[in-house]
Every structure is written in C-alpha cells, then in structure tokens.
Amino acid sequence: MKNITVIGSGTMGNGIAHTFAQFGYSVNLVDINEQALQKAMLTIAKNLDRQVTKGSITETDKANTLNNIKTYTDLMVAAQNADLVVEAASENLEVKLKLFKQLDEICGTETILASNTSSISITKIAAATKRADKVIGMHFMNPVPVMKLIEVIRGYSTSDEVCKLIMETSKKINKIPVEVNDYPGFVANKILMPMINEAIITLYEGVAGVEEIDTVMKLGMAHPMGPLQLADFIGLDVCLNIMRVLQDGFGNPKYAPCPLLVNMVTAGHLGVKSAKGFYDYSVGGKELILADRFKKKELLVEN
C-alpha cells in the first residue's frame, strides 16, 4: 500500500496524515472546509518543527513529509486511487455510515476502508458497504505522531488477510498494533471511559473535589494524568458520546453517563477545546500546566 487517503483534518486526522507521510506514504488529506485543511497543514508543519528541534528528524525529512501530503475538499478526487482510506471524521454514526457508503462507490474494489472510531461498531459501519471483509478499525491514540498504540478492530466480517495487512502496515509507521474484537468501546474505552465516568460521579456525589480526585489517582495509582483532567483533554462531549455507545451497546445501567457530565456538555463546557471543563483553561489557567507537562514529556499537543 502506497496511497493513503485520510478523511477529516482535525486533531486526529492531521496526526494520522503526518504519520503516514513521514514514513514515505503518499497522503491525500480531505475535508469539506478549505480553512480547516490550511490549519491542519500549519499544525503538521509546527509539529514537524518540534521533531526537528528534538533532533528526531532533519529539515529534509520535514520537507519530504510535507511534500507527501496533498489536500482536497473533493472526496471523489481524493479517494478514487487510494489503497487505504482512514476515516477520522466526527464520532457520529450517521456521518460515518454516509461516508462509508460513498467510499464504497468511489474506491476501487481492493481498497481497504478503515475507521479511526474510538467506540462505534466496525460491523455496523461495514454494513453500509458491499465490502464488509475490507472494513476495519484503526484506532490511533492522541497525539498520533507520538503515541505508539493502534487498536486494530476486526468487524464481524473483516478478513484475515485485511487484518494481517493492517497489522503489518501499522508496524511500518512505527506503531504497535493490538488486535481486538468488535464490541462497544473495544478495549481502551471500555475500560477508560467507565473509570472517567466514575470519577465524575465521585465529584457529583461530593466525595471529593476535582483536584483531590485527580491527585489520588495520580499519586495512588501512578496515572500520569488524573481522570478529570484527562476527560478535559479528550473532550467532555467525546466522553459523553462514548458512554452512550457503551450504554446502548451493553444495555447495562453501570454505563449510564453521570448527570453532571450531561449537564456540562449541554452547557458547552467541553474541556480544553472550550477553555472550560473541570479546570479553567483561560490564559494563565490550567492550560499552561497542561502545556508544560506535555512539553516535558515531548508530546505533541494541539489544543
């Protein structure tokens, strides 16, 4: 596989495009918004500059990476010659079903269609196509250029050949793929999101405050970031959507999202992206602590 199309130029999409391009793949990055594409390319350039500063790549590597990426607002043009399409659009089932139906009509019969979904059923997404054996999940972690893990999710009909090829391709871009089966939340979010939700319930019930909850988990459980701070970083809207997927998928009341989480999302307090969540991310607030923390860890964070 040489030609990769990435759909969606947000934090995950531009990170995925960056990573494939850095390892010599020809990448078409597509979004419906030209301004979003321009912002994505600036982000990729900035993150490459950080890698140059660290000495992990050269200026030539940076130039080659940027030259390997082309941007498009026309999905048909961007995807028609792809060997692999990685969808990184919003975590919305209807959006994904519509996209995969379009991709099935646009792409060649051998093209593999992958979704970066963090919780939605690959089997359900594949049902929108006539190539269910060639639909698979590639759940990258944020920030993509740094984090090693890819959850490779097999849908009910995903073929052994396609799974093997995606596992091999993941290794070629210096990632560590882990094969998992298609159940709500897969492994990462089936474990992580109930923990975050339970931390929010602990706050909601008045057991302890925000800083106290996060401190207990950081110092007592050796977590690098407390669950409430992590929820802000992920996005409270994303956390809520995943909890609802878990609740609908398993039908178990233990996955019901905390009312405080629901209210915060309704109020538009989404964490870092809205400058207000469990912490205040206005200038001089928790945002500076987050930035310093990730800078020390040499992570590429794009708020």
Image (tube, grey):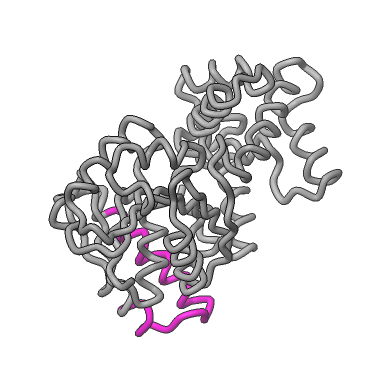
Examine the structure image and report whether residue 172 is included in the region drawn in magenta.
no
Magenta span dominant secondary structure:
helix
Q: Quadrant of residue 216?
A: top right
Residue occupying the point 48% across, 43% down: 156
> 28 or 247: nearer the eye?
247
Q: Quadrant of the N terminus?
A: bottom left
Residue 6 visible at all? yes
Residue occupying the point 74% across, 37% down: 214
Magenta part of the chain: 39-63
Residue occupying the point 35% across, 85% down: 60
Can you give x and y, in whole percent of width and height, for residue 155 in the image? 47, 45
Can you give x and y, in whole percent of width and height, for residue 198 in the image? 71, 27
Residue occupying the point 67% across, 31% down: 194
Q: Quadrant of residue 249?
A: top right
> 153 or 30: nearer the eye?
153
How many numbered discs, if any? 0
Examine the structure image and report whether residue 45 is included in the region drawn in magenta.
yes
Against 193, is 155 above or below? below
Q: Is residue 183 left or right of residue 108?
A: right
Against 295, is 7 above or below? above
Q: Is residue 48 left or right of residue 31?
A: right
